[in-house]
Amino acid sequence: MRLILLKLLVLFVLLSSQSYLAYAGTDLDSRESAASSSSGNGAGVLKGQITNQDRLSPLGAEFRVGARLDLAGIKKLQALTPDNNWDRIPDWFAGDWKQETSTSYYRYDYCSGGQDFGVDTGLALSKEHRGWQRDNAGNIWEYSYRNYIGVTECEDIWAISYVKDTELLLSAGDRIVMRFLAVSVHVDKESRQILRNAQTESIQTYTPAGPGIVKVNASVKAFDQMGNPMLLNKLIAYERCLKPFRPIDSYRGKNMRVLFAEYLQSHGLGKLIPAGANQGRGLSRK
């Protein structure tokens, strides 16, 4: 879910051990415009974007290089019940969406100071559903789920991406900004020891770019296990709407209608509880 842009840099960080970037004197805004054209849309450059953090906190001992990783224990993280948090989103952002490619237009290596302004479009397939429930006033809300993992089995290693936080930073009429924070590790199958690791922060800005089209600007920054910056990658992608909004009433055994009603009630928004969602829980639409 919304991880394809984040994974692009994570995989590079874990597979690369040398600095490779060289300075190329090109204007960054012009490269972003070129990336937009390469992705099939000439939409303008977004200004005043929320930026990545300078540093992150060091990783815990369980994720450090050399530590033995208990896969069963890590997978339990996915089963943790997150706080019952919801965010209201605009109608244009909701529905079933598909992304096919992404275009990288800027890379910066913090170790060498090198920059790369090359425009590179590659395959980046993903599908996702956005918008979980609609309130009594017709507003669409997104469930803020956290603590989910992806495990890819390779010949000698497991490649694990643990997304530990998602946060809606901004929801304006024509702009959504989200932050994703992840830990990625490569684990040796035989020894169960962590061979490589990286922390990744992805700031993703979504804007409408035409009927049923959303543009995604992503600033993806990788950090080492001590929280020091390593690489920055800027990308553009476009999503196409496959289906309009539809509610999700059940997720991992949870009744999402009831959870949504409980959230609204606890935040003084009882009047927005949809009809029937408060049955059997003593919730009041007041």
Image (cartoon, rainbow, N blue to C red):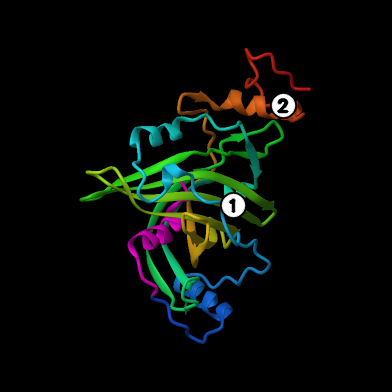
| Residue 96 x, y percent position in the rendering | 48, 46
Label 1 environment density (alpha carbons within 10 Å; few <14, some 14–19, many ≥20): some
Task: Find disc 2 in the rendering and name its residue.
Answer: 266
SS class, disc 1: strand
| Residue 280 x, y percent position in the rendering | 62, 12
200 vs 48, left or right, is: left
Label 2 environment density (alpha carbons within 10 Å; few <14, some 14–19, many ≥20): few
Q: In this figure, what is the number of numbered marks? A: 2
Asked if residue 18 is positioned above or below residue 87 in the image, the reply reads below
The residue closer to the viewer here, 74 or 213, is 74
| Residue 5 x, y percent position in the rendering | 45, 58
CA distance for labels 2 and 1 = 24 Å
Task: Find disc 1 in the rendering and name its residue.
Answer: 178
Asked if residue 32 is among those painted magenta in the image, a careful observer would answer: no
Choose top left, top right, bottom left or bottom right for residue 68.
top left
Image quadrant occupied by the C terminus: top right
Instruction: Report the residue at 65% width, 51% height from top.
Output: 169
Instruction: Report the residue at 57% width, 62% height from top.
Output: 210
102 vs 166, left or right, is: left
Q: Amino acid at mark 2?
A: Ser
The residue closer to the viewer here, 163 or 170, is 163
Q: Earlier in the sequence, mark 2 or mark 1?
A: 1
Q: Amino acid at mark 1?
A: Met
| Residue 91 x, y percent position in the rendering | 62, 47
Residue range in magenta is 1-19
Instruction: Report the residue at 70% width, 29% height from top.
Output: 264
Instruction: Report the residue at 47% width, 83% height from top.
Output: 23
Asked if residue 156 is positioned above or below residue 106 in the image, the reply reads above
